[in-house]
Amino acid sequence: MSLLSFLDRDRSIASPGYSRWLVPPAALAIHLAIGQVYAFSVFVNPLLAYKAADGSSWSHKEVGYIFSLAIAILGISAAIFGKWLETAGPRKAMFAAATCFGLGFLVASFGTTLHSLPLIYLGYGVIGGVGLGLGYISPVSTLIKWFPDRPGLSTGLAIMGFGGGAMIGAPLANNLMAYFKTHSTIQPIAGAFFCMGILYFLFMMFGVFMIRVPAPGWKPAGFVPPAHQSAMISSHNVTVNSAMATPQFWLLWLVLALNVTAGIGILESAAPMLQNLFSGKVTALAAGGFVGVLSLFNMGGRFVWASLSDFIGRKMTYMLFFTLGAVLYFLLPSIHMLSLFVLVAGVLISMYGGGFATIPAYLKDLFGGINVSAIHGRTLTAWSTAGIVGPLIVNGILDHYKATNRPLAEAYPTILHIMSGLLVLGFIANLLVHPVSERFWIKDGTPIPADTGGH
């Protein structure tokens, strides 16, 4: 049996008696790896300090574009390849994700050695971004199919790994850069990129070999769909093209975009923000620890909030994100106790992560499970947009303060208050979400698009 045939969807159908609880570890292997993107802020200061042979260096905006491009390509590739995933199956998509994600680091390593920002953009941003998009969506719909009784919990199980990726990525990057700085002539950032590309590829291959899809007609033992359920949970299906013609799709697109833009306001510059706001009290190592703490909250929030949404509903869960979040973002700049600041930032990031984990189940509730991968993939273009807008706001304000010789610490109240305002807009968008009109449903006798798991 060749590797290519092993990747086929029909070779990954679970045998009778296969435990569905073996599937979440496969999803976690992928998401813990690609979640490294949340640790990118540990590279920010080293990249800013890295000078070319002629003494030139890069600005906050130029370095910020690396992260923005990776997130933008994540959403675009998820939208483009979502329908392909439904026919190709998760194993083939995961292998493609591992290949692109690992290769992206290697190209970025070469670009760093040459002090070439375009090559870093190509590697970490474009090639790695495709790996991010494929890796992100590949296990989600599979888990929903394994857990029709708890869709929020299932997506939380997978997507919490993405939030926890910085727990591995931040110390790994810092330790690798420290090693190459003292034990090698290789440029430290380039050396770290190269090693991480190899290590993450191997780690993601565990998920490739472990993933299984349920056999046609499979249901959990004793599972009976509830006779009465919320009006926000439809028993009908909507195709991906029809979904994009509904106001609900675009309202949820806006909900996700605003929630993500606010969260990126903290995540994208977490390490330097803490060092600037608590100047003299926080070392670079401690700032890296802050990134790890945020990763814990990001990871835990994805599981806790998504699981909670199974009981209180997706719409109510987002209402909590937007009301509590708007208040905490507004108050955060006035908190001068380091421990309390870290705690509040962690709560905010838990809701940011919870939004990602809840959105696939929200989409399944409204549009059914037939095309959930493709609909989810297209919704993630909201993340692409937020990945550009969020850092543009943050880095644009920071560069303005730097250019006018004002303390960077004074820039963060403005940044965080803007994020608070965005969440108020998100509250309004979520308030307008209602059940999808019957005219968009797939009717009896209507050809159903090729699906790999709407059994």
Image (cartoon, helix red, strand yellow):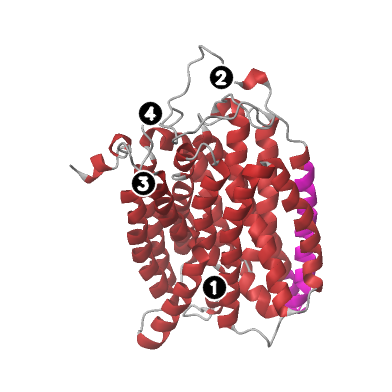
Query: Which numbered disc covers residue 211?
Result: 3
Q: Residue at x 65, y 34 (%)?
A: 249
Residue matched to label 2: 442
Q: Are marks 3 and 2 in contact (CB under 8 Å)?
A: no
The residue to which callout 1 is attached is: 42
Q: Residue at x 41, y 73 (%)?
A: 192
Q: What is the distance, in whole Å, between disc 4 and disc 2 at their CAs?
A: 20 Å
Quarter of image, res 430: top right
- Amino acid type, mark 4: Pro
On screen, 237 above or below 411? Answer: above
What segment is highlighted magenta in the picture?
399-428
For badge 3, the amino acid type reads Ile
Of the residues under marks 3 and 2, which one precedes in the sequence?
3
Mark 1 and mark 2: span between their CA atoms?
47 Å
**Three-letter amino acid code of the residue under disc 2:** Ile
Q: Earlier in the sequence, mark 1 or mark 3?
A: 1
Residue 56 image point, x, y percent = 54, 77
Q: Quadrant of the N terminus?
A: top left
Where is residue 14 shown, x and y percent of the image? 33, 39
